[in-house]
Image (cartoon, rainbow, N blue to C red):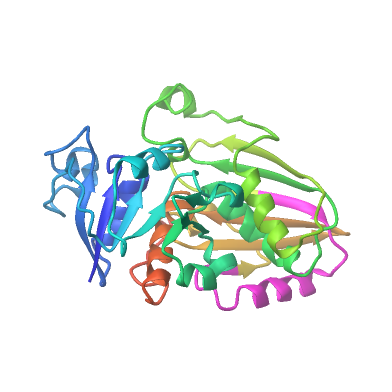
Amino acid sequence: MINVGIIGGSGYTAGELIRILMFHPKAKLDFVYSTTNAGKPLSVAHHDLMGDIEMNFTDTVNPNVNVVFLCLGHGKSIQFLEQNQFASHTKIIDLGNDFRLTKDNQFEGKSFVYGLPELNKANIKNANYIANPGCFATAIQLALLPLAADGLLNNDVHINATTGSTGAGVSPSETTHFSWRSNNMSHYKAFDHQHLGEINQGVNQLQADYTNELIFVPNRGDFARGIFATLYTTVEESLEDLVAKYEAFYKDQPFVTVTNTNINLKQVVQTNKCIISLMKKGNRVLITSIIDNLVKGASGQAIQNMNLMFGLEESTGLHLKPSGF
């Protein structure tokens, strides 16, 4: 069994990790670290776990676990690792943004691999340290990578993506308050979202000469979880050829499905799936990419990476049912 530790156990991503790991056949939770809830049951922060797991939060770290997930929020992983040492065999998966960019992926001799399995699977299998991708970055890269792999990105890409309120984290704010979010919609960080660095990095890994602009407008949606991303650009290939290229690119990727039909968010919520829909009018292709921001966009993908790192089938413990209705 893989002994697992979770650091920063009170937030949404930690809660999703706990829920999935409870039923993972090859993993066992060793500890869930939270200084604010130490000594209290996990259900104090994750109410839906009441009656399912008898474990308390702790403020003590077991440095000898096989793998530790860092769920500390952006910019805090480096600080934690500077103050806490783990055994040489302990693998680290960081769900924050500290190590995602190549220029920032080194820490005390440790090199963090960018953990998008559909892009870096071979490197992930041999890695000890993983920088788990951002949620928008996951949905948008999966929409673009097949085009980049064939050198077909030759124009600007316009991106509009809407995320649920859980994307803002568990700490309440004005724009996550129910009375503000309900029956409402807004955009934020237009053209300057922090995930653009990851997206450009992934695209350039497959198409180094792409120098056009990714024009990204993120939106806040009136729902709790999920990302609905639409992208359009100009491509000469026919729809049939594009669908064939996407299917070929993802043929060995168990969590990505390609279609030319309309899709909706409930098809992926509560799952580690990404569904990509392709449509075309003239030379303009519309790509729709949908994921659950907390599963494929965070904790599910982190467990997918864990599976790869430990030589397991990558879908182990991740056969999850969508909400459907």
Callout count: 0
Instruction: Quadrant for residue 172, please give it.
Output: top left
Instruction: Quadrant for residue 129, please give it.
Output: bottom left
* Magenta stretch contains residue 252: yes
Residue 190 place in picture, x, y as percent? 67, 32
Q: Which residues are magenta?
A: 230-257
* Magenta stretch contains residue 277: no
- In this orientation, does residue 231 appear? yes
Residue 96 place in picture, x, y as percent? 45, 44
Residue 212 place in picture, x, y as percent? 82, 49
Residue under the point 18% across and 43% down: 43
Position of 302 relative to 226 (above/below): below
Residue under the point 36% across and 72% down: 310
Out of 208 and 245, give the one closest to the viewer: 208
Left or right: 62 as drawn, with respect to 73 = left
- In this orientation, does residue 262 appear? no
Left or right: 23 as drawn, with respect to 269 = left
Out of 183 and 80, give the one closest to the viewer: 80
Out of 84 and 303, give the one closest to the viewer: 84
Left or right: 89 as drawn, with respect to 270 = left
Residue 168 place in picture, x, y as percent? 46, 35
Location of the C terminus by quadrant is bottom left
Residue under the point 69% across and 61% down: 205
Location of the N terminus by quadrant is bottom left
Position of 314 relative to 282 (above/below): below
Residue under the point 76% across and 62% down: 207
